[in-house]
Amino acid sequence: MRILLICPSFYDYHKQIVNELQRQGHEVTFFAERPTRLIYSFAKKLPQNLTNFIFDKFQQKILSIYKNHTFDLVLVIRGEIIAPWLINSMRGLQPSCRFVLYQWDSLKVVDFEKLIPLFDQTETFDSVDAKSLGISYFPLFFVPGYRSDKQISIKTSDLTFVGSYHETRYLKLKKVHRYCEEHGISFEYFLYISIFDFIKLHIMRKKVPSFSEVSFKKLDQTKIVKRYLGASAVLDIENERQSGLTIRTFEVLATNRYLVTTNQMSPVLLPELSSRIVHIDIDNLSFSKDDFRADLLDDDQLDRYALSSWISHLVGM
């Protein structure tokens, strides 16, 4: 199958998705869903008509690629700046092509409602959005490397966290850190922020982490897995603007570690794995290391959340 993939350049997930599509025998043309961060950030600060002009110019590049190739499937993941005119133009050029939209952000973050009628199938990772919009719910995935029976680990902490800096997330992280110190739970965390954002926040006198609390370099997958395996449980702090289960949710479970999460939907949406999930209320913390002391055995039910299964589902819709 010849596939045009329009997807965020997010860590290396786009590369993993392309690799899996190719492994399953498809011919893939990849295009980022939006311009580079510098251009995107600049455009968002302009008046709406200028923002639209810059984004339309970017989408014209996608259309020019589409005009010169024949595709069986256009797979759009998130598609933050994708406009209806682009999808309509593509449909007019190749009427037999199938269009699938998968949303891995909530409607509150990316307003994709106007795109739904233009696609043959739309699914979302957010069960609340799925119900309100009348579309299908389908959860996210874990990528290869997080699940392996050959992984050997020596645990050095009870709880760990790996993620990027956001002010709300940081404040919640500090709450958990203080709680752990008070209750004898060893907790290690890794917080990434770009040096540009770090300097900007300090200039704006925002409440930001100290220099010693952050890293200006992201961890690669191997190092993230090593950190997960070095703990009994991994903390996930949900985005307040969404209820969907993050990719981190499935990556943690794939490594056979307990998931300690602020997302109350996790045990509800994953009932078959609920014994591996510890839900916490950030405003009323109450958990102990006994909640994730027992070793977890591998569970075949995790296979349904592998990237290969996720890809097969989307391509087969």
Image (cartoon, rainbow, N blue to C red):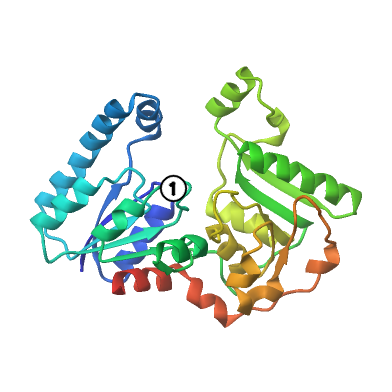
Q: Where residue 251 sits: x, y (%)? A: 57, 63
Q: Is any atom of residue 123 visible in this view?
A: yes
Taking the image as shown, residue 14 lies to the left or right of residue 275, namely left
Which residue is situated farthest in the top direction here?
Answer: 203
Q: Residues within 10 Å of mark 1 (few under 14, many from 20)?
A: few
The residue at the point 59 percent across, 73 percent down is: 270
Q: Is any atom of residue 151 visible in this view?
A: no
Please determine whether, in this image, residue 246 is positioned above or below residue 138.
above
Location of residue 264 (image quadrant): bottom right
Q: Quadrant of the C terminus?
A: bottom left
Near-viewer residue (72 or 86): 86
The residue at the point 75 percent across, 48 percent down is: 188
Counting labels gives 1
Please determine whether, in this image, residue 241 is positioned above or below residue 246.
above
Q: Quadrant of the N terminus?
A: bottom left
Q: Where residue 180 sits: x, y (%)? A: 84, 51
Near-viewer residue (241 or 275): 241
Location of residue 271 (image quadrant): bottom right
Which residue is situated farthest in the bottom direction here?
Answer: 300
Taking the image as shown, residue 21 lies to the left or right of residue 237, namely left
Near-viewer residue (49 or 164): 49
Location of residue 91 (image quadrant): bottom left
Helix, strand or loop status at disc 1: loop
Look at mark 1 in the image and give the residue it sits on.
10
The residue at the point 36 percent across, 53 percent down is: 113
Q: Where residue 250 sits: x, y (%)? A: 56, 65
Q: Where residue 168 sits: x, y (%)? A: 65, 40
Please determine whether, in this image, residue 58 is positioned above or below residue 89.
above
Q: What amino acid is at disc 1? A: Phe
Please determine whether, in this image, residue 163 is positioned above or below residue 212.
below
